[in-house]
Image: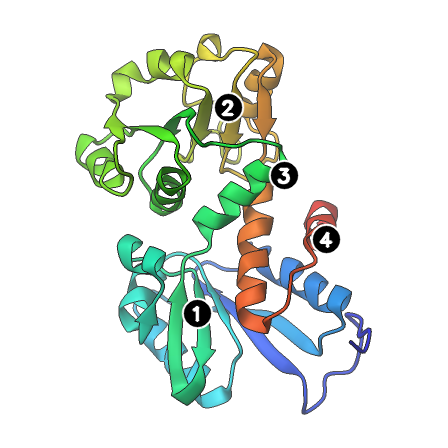
Amino acid sequence: MSGLGPDAAITAHTQLAAVIGDPIRHSLSPTLHNAAYAATGLDWRFMAFEVPAGAAPGALDAMRVLGIRGYSVTMPHKTDVAAACDTLSDDAARLRSVNCVVPRTGGVLHGESTDGEGFLRSLADAGVDVAGRSVLLLGAGGAARAVALALGRAGARLGISARRLDAATGVAALADGSTIVEWAARDAAAAAADIVVNGTPIGMGGDTGIPVSAAALRPDQVVADLVVHPLVTPLLAAAAKAGAQPVEGLGMLVHQAAVAFTHFTGIDAPVEAMLRSVRAR
C-alpha cells in the first residue's frame, strides 16, 4: 500500500468505480468508498453517475469498454441490472435484484446483492445473533426482501407484515418457515417478537410516524431500522425510551458497502474508517 490520500494526484494508473442511480446526488457511496481507498492506500476513486431509468444496460456496456472496476447500484436500476448481468450470485438470482456489479475475466459482469449480508453484520456489531429468535419484519421493498432472505438463512423465525398482502406473501417465500402477519395485527406481533425490523420508509426524513405502536416495544427487545435519514428515527427513539436495544440503519449502509468494496478490490474493507467518514458527513 502506498498510503494514497484523498488529495493524491489522479494518474493514468488510477482505477475507477462508481454508483449508478437516479436520483444520485444524495448518495453516501462516494464518501464511504473513497474513505476506504484512502485508508487502504489504493489508487482508486469512486464517483456517482446519474443514469436515467431504462439506461442501466448502457451503463454496464460502458463498464466493459472503459474498464470500470465496479458499480454500486441503487434505485431504479437494481432489477434491470440483474437482468443485464452475465452471471448472478445465488442471493441476487433469488431476489432478482443487484446492488453490486463486479467485472470478471473475459468481460463477464457478475451481479451481487450485499444488503442482506450488510444487515446481518450490523446486527453482529451490536452483539445480536438472530438464530432461533423471533423477528417481525415490516415492509416488502427491495431492502426488506434482501433482509428477509438473510434472516431466514441465519435461522431466524420470521414474520412478515406489509400493507399489501400479496407483497408480504412474496417476501415470505424467500425465507423457509416464515409467516405472514396482517398489517392490522402488526402491533400484537411486534409485542411478541424478540427483534423488530422496520423495512418501510415510515419515519424517513421529516415523517414523524412509527410503523408499530410505541406501546408494543419492551426492554428485552432489539429494534432495528433500515432508514438512515435521520440516524435516530422516531421508531428508534421510541425503542430507546422503552428500554429496547436500538440498531441504526447506518450500520447496514456501511457494511453493505464494505462487502461491495471487497468484491471490487479483493481486500478486506476498513469498516471503522468508512463508518467515521459517513458519520462526519
Residue at 72 percent across and 50 percent down: it is: 272
266 up-or-down from 10: above or below? above
Q: Are marks 3 and 4 in contact (CB under 8 Å)?
A: no
Badge nearest the viewer, 2 or 3? 3
Residue 157: horizontal and vertical position, in percent?
Answer: 35, 28
Q: Do the residues labelled 3 and 1 touch (CB within 8 Å)?
A: no
Q: Earlier in the sequence, mark 2 or mark 1?
A: 1
Q: Which of marks 2 and 4 is nearer the N terminus?
A: 2
Q: Mark 1 points at which residue?
A: 101
Locate the N terminus and report the quarter of the image it occupies.
Answer: bottom right
Quarter of the rendering containing residue 25: bottom right
- Determine the CA span between mark 2 and mark 1: 35 Å
Disc 1 marks which amino acid? Answer: Val
At label 2, counting other C-alpha atoms closer than 10 Å, the crowd grade (few under 14, some 14-19, many 20 or more) is few
Assign a secondary structure to mark 4.
helix
4 up-or-down from 173: above or below? below
Quarter of the rendering containing residue 241: top right
Disc 2 marks which amino acid? Answer: Thr
Residue at 55 percent across and 44 percent down: it is: 121
Q: Mark 3 points at which residue?
A: 125
Badge nearest the viewer, 1 or 4? 1
Residue 212: horizontal and vertical position, in percent?
Answer: 41, 18
Whether residue 249 is visible: no
Disc 3 marks which amino acid? Answer: Asp
